[in-house]
Image (cartoon, rainbow, N blue to C red):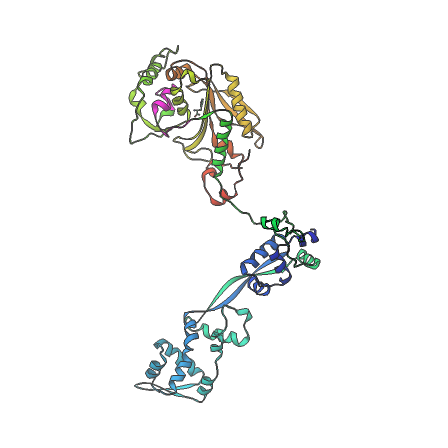
């Protein structure tokens, strides 16, 4: 540690507090320095971060006046009032009336005063009191208990004199006069470094804390020194408001596609099976359409179908229509096509986009980063609601090499340098490819989604003509888990405040 440097960079509050630290607590330091407690606390925190002081927590018993204590402070202790009233009355009920005491208080008084031999009690139908010689002394002198309740509260028991301790013990036996609570007291102690800095000498000169327009105008800075900032000291973490870390990553992915000239696709979460599956040439008996895999909507159960496209999609399924394919060779069911469901993939947005395109719009590129839903059992690997990164490139000149190029570029920007595609199968693409990226931390390839070139059975019914359409759909969550060091996919959406606060900012 550079002692001189640390000493010169001390904040004005630190300058005031450091010389006074000597096992004192916050309130004592405040008294000593004339600072507010909050200022002392702040200075101590800074000094602690610089390891110039250590803060010792000590448990302290602290006494405060309770409700009856406050009352007796104003009205006097009951035993005193009792004695005074007993100077002119003998019957207990009269005394009670005069002194304005409750039944309970009178009982306490009788006990106390008899113990102090100030009264004697006789019973003759009712109770009578006669005062002893002792009572005079009690009436004239302030008792220890009376003195005690006149102290300035709160008081630490450790700071009480012997007599006061005795008074406290007596008062504690009585109802709601005092209250003793154990609190944590912090005391500051100089560390070795703190002593060195102090020995270096702390000038109480007023250093400039910052440059203001006024200072510039008045040239007031000329004969003054600026306080050097110490940028190396640890300061408490400050958590500003920020977007959910998953949304930060989503925003980034969107910006990557926008930068590559893609337009964003939007659409409903609720779709018909027609758009989600049939228009993509997924056969109506495909297992993915089972209720075990797809979440269907109960109410409204059915959606609307697009008349013109419906006919050609139906024909394509049944016999291939004019696509050159033989189709699936079954009777297409309108009932199944009309079923409403929660979209199972964002490829449904691609299908709808294709259906809206005209020849003049080409070439065109589209993307979406949107939620999809599947009837999955929740596990460390699977969510039933997750985000897909979808894309299509509609271009007469597009080929598989371009597909790999777009994906490689996207993944490079996502921090994955190595991408490979492997043969796969999807009903809507030919060829079809699975996409994998290499994760150095795991020293392995992870599968991130599917891709391919849409079949004529998809493009021709939707667009009316055939054109190569590159298509992909990637799982978003798996792409960013590495970045946030998350191993269980559910952690992404746990929304634990500490996790959200501490999650690093997405920066690629
Ligand atoms: N829809 C596929 C899935 O959800 C991904 C995919 C998209 C495959 C586009 C090929 C083409 O897994």
Please name the residue shown 38% across and 85% down the image. 86
Give how far across and how far down residue 177 sits, in percent: 43, 72
Give how far across and how far down residue 64 sits, in percent: 47, 68
State yes or no: residue 286 in magenta: yes
Residue 5 position (above or below residue 105): above
Give how far across and how far down residue 130 sits, in percent: 38, 88
Residues shaded magenta: 265-287
Q: Is residue 335 visible?
A: yes
User: Relative to residue 345, is residue 193 drawn left or right?
Assistant: right
Residue 232 position (above or below residue 384): below
Q: Is residue 282 visible?
A: no
User: Relative to residue 271, is residue 187 drawn left or right?
Assistant: right
Residue 137 position (above or below residue 301): below
Ligand 1 sits in which quadrant?
top left
Please name the residue shown 45% across and 83% down the image. 116
State yes or no: residue 255 in magenta: no
Total label count?
0
- In the picture, the quarter occupied by the C terminus is top right
Q: Residue furthest front?
A: 218
Instruction: Report which quarter residue 297 is drawn in.
Output: top left
Give how far across and how far down residue 147 sits, in percent: 49, 77
Instruction: Report which quarter residue 278 is drawn in.
Output: top left
Instruction: Report which quarter residue 375 is drawn in.
Output: top left
Please name the residue shown 44% across and 74% down the image. 73
* Residue toward you, 185 or 71: 71
């Amino acid at each position: 540690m550079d002692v001189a440097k640390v000493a010169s960079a001390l904040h004005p509050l630190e300058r005031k507090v450091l010389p006074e630290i000597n096992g004192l607590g916050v309130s004592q330091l405040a008294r000593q320095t004339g600072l507010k407690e909050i200022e002392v606390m702040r200075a101590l925190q800074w000094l602690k971060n610089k390891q110039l002081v250590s803060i010792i927590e000590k448990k302290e018993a602290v006494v405060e006046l309770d409700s009856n204590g406050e009352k007796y402070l104003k009205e006097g202790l009951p035993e005193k009032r009792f004695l005074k009233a007993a100077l002119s009355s003998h019957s207990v009920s009269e005394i009670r009336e005069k002194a304005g005491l409750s039944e309970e208080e009178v009982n306490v008084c009788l006990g106390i005063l008899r113990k102090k031999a100030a009264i004697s009690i006789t019973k003759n139908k009712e109770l009578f009191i006669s005062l002893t010689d002792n009572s005079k002394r009690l009436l004239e002198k302030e008792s220890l208990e009376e003195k005690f309740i006149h102290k300035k509260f709160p008081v630490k028991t450790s700071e009480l004199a012997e007599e006061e301790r005795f008074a406290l013990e007596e008062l504690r036996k009585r109802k709601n006069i005092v209250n003793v609570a154990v609190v944590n007291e912090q005391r500051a102690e100089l560390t070795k470094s703190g002593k060195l800095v102090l020995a270096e000498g702390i000038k109480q000169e007023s250093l400039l804390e910052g440059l203001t327009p006024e200072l510039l105008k008045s040239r007031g800075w000329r004969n003054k020194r600026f306080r050097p900032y110490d940028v190396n000291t640890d300061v408490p973490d400050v958590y500003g408001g920020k977007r959910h870390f998953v949304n930060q990553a989503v925003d980034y992915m969107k910006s990557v596609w926008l930068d590559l000239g893609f337009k964003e696709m939007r659409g409903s979460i609720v779709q018909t099976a027609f758009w989600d599956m049939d228009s993509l040439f997924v056969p109506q008996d495909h297992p993915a359409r089972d209720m075990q895999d797809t979440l269907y909507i109960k109410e409204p159960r059915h959606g609307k179908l697009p008349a013109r496209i419906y006919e050609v999609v139906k024909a394509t399924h049944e016999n291939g229509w004019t696509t050159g394919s033989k189709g699936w060779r079954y009777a297409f069911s309108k009932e199944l096509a009309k079923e409403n469901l929660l979209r199972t993939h964002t490829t449904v947005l691609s299908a709808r986009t294709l259906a809206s395109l005209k020849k003049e719009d080409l070439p065109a590129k589209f993307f979406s980063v949107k939620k999809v839903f599947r009837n999955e059992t929740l596990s460390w690997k699977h969510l039933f609601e997750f985000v897909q990164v979808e894309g299509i490139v509609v271009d007469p000149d597009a080929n598989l090499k371009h597909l790999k190029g777009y994906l490689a570029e996207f993944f490079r920007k996502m921090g994955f340098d190595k991408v490979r595609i492997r043969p796969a199968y999807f009903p809507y693409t030919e060829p079809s490819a699975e996409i994998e990226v290499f994760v150095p931390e795991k020293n392995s390839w992870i599968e991130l989604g599917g891709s391919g070139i849409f079949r004529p059975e998809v493009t021709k019914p939707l667009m009316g003509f055939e054109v190569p359409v590159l298509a992909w759909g990637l799982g978003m969550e798996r792409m960013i888990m590495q970045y946030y060091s998350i191993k269980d996919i559910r952690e992404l959406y746990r929304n634990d405040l500490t996790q959200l606060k501490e999650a690093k900012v997405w920066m690629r």
